Amino acid sequence: MKIFKRWTPAPLLYSACICLQLTACSPAPAPGNAAIPTPTATLAGTTAMTLSIQHQSFGQLADGREVSLYKLTNANGVALDVTNYGGIITRLVTPDAKGQFADIVLGYDNLAQYVENNPYFGAIIGRYGNRIAAGKFALNGTTYQLATNDGANHLHGGVQGFDKKLWDAKTFQQQDAVGVVLSLVSPDGDQGYPGTLKVEVTYRLTNSNELQMTFVATTDKTTVVNLTQHSYFNLAGGGDILSHELMIPADRITPVGAGLIPTGELQDVTGTPFDFRSAKAIGRDIAAEDAQLKLGLGYDHNFVLKNSPDSQLVFAGRVLEPNSGRVLEVLTDDIAVQFYSGNFLDGTLTGKGQTYRHRSGFCLEPQHFPDAPNQPGFASTVLEPGQTYQSRIVYRFSTQATKE
Ligand code: GLA
């Protein structure tokens, strides 16, 4: 995330900027990061298709407001379904190394289940992603009390966070990409946060098999902002994710105490189950005798990608599912990523013909540090009037030959 004093141009112009940016400043290797290949990712067996956008109804909310579903497809058959309810990615279909297509995200195929019981499947998260201790923070001498919707703490923006808002939506089509721009006005006092926050999130699906997401926000009062995307992935399309091979180029985490609130320290990952600098199966060390794993009920921790905020796009993680050969690379200009191994999934939720059992999905949520408003040692998430909050996340899809 970076905060800077300038007004952001309109979407079409906007995405041009993004392209320019991506090519102009291809991400410098972060610690332990291999050079990032240019996105020539090939997807085996993909048949020539065309970029397309379909718009259909996704039902109505209890107050009668219409909800939409946008079905985007690129020229390689990668398909993305997004609803303007919570900006939720409800379906993401990519081919495996043999060209077989499958849906690689957890979620539902109807609005009712998202309204009723959604553990943030595929949603835009805000105003503040992750936890704030006791739901409380002070700004310029004023203390703000937020909902405590996660035990004694505040999680993911509160009871009615951005994941439960109805966003305005506009689609766009370009030479090499299709997309949707979602916008929202979160009023002063929304969920207890100060300031009217104007937010715009752009999803852009390209023919080079990337989903590029940009988050932009401005405010009329001093406030705090930390936006992210909360997709749960299973690159096999089902089963658990313990044999997925994960690499995270981070040499430190922020350890947590009770309630998963950071202690304020930075912990070196060397010699701990949190060392993912070389790819390993998610399940290899997940049951190790480790205090942090116990607190997280598995992996549910903030991995540090940068020493300080800048606009460099860096690797946040790379995941290979060895049987299908599917690869997901996550890139971001944010300073950290929350790796969550689906510890709260317990088989009570079902969707799209699947039962979501324990650890049947994982999340890589680029973000600023949890509880930063209360942690002077952490990079600031304060946004002032006249400044623009902007962050980027890229999901890059490819395949790798499988071991026969
Ligand atoms: C994040 C949190 C987890 C959990 C999930 C959603 O990943 O870190 O503790 O709350 O969201 O359920």
Image (cartoon, rainbow, N blue to C red):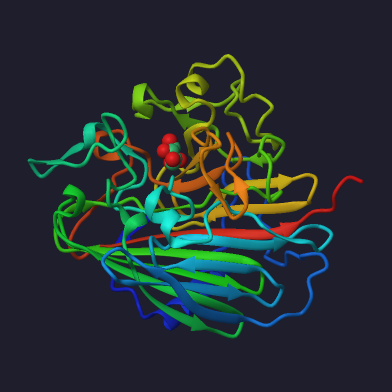
Q: Position of residue 369 (x, y in %)?
A: 37, 40
Residue at the image position 49 percent from the left and 67 percent from the top: 82
Q: Give the position of the N terminus as an image quadrant.
A: bottom left
Q: Residue at the spot x=55%, y=73% of the render?
A: 71
Q: Position of residue 364 (x, y in %)?
A: 53, 46
Dividing the picture into quarters, in which one does residue 105 lie? bottom right
Residue occupying the point 45% across, 60% down: 88
Residue at the limit of the structure toward the top, as seen here:
289
In the depicted view, which residue is nearer to us: 73 or 401?
Answer: 73
Which residue appears at 57% of the width and 42% of the height? 356
Residue sitting nearer the eye, 246 or 161:
161
Residue 194 in the image, given as x and y percentages of width and height = 15, 53
Looking at the image, which is closer to me, 284 or 376? Answer: 284
Whether residue 262 is visible here, answered yes or no, is no
Q: In which image quadrant can residue 202 be found?
A: bottom left
Q: Quadrant of ligand 1?
A: top left
Q: Residue furthest right?
A: 404
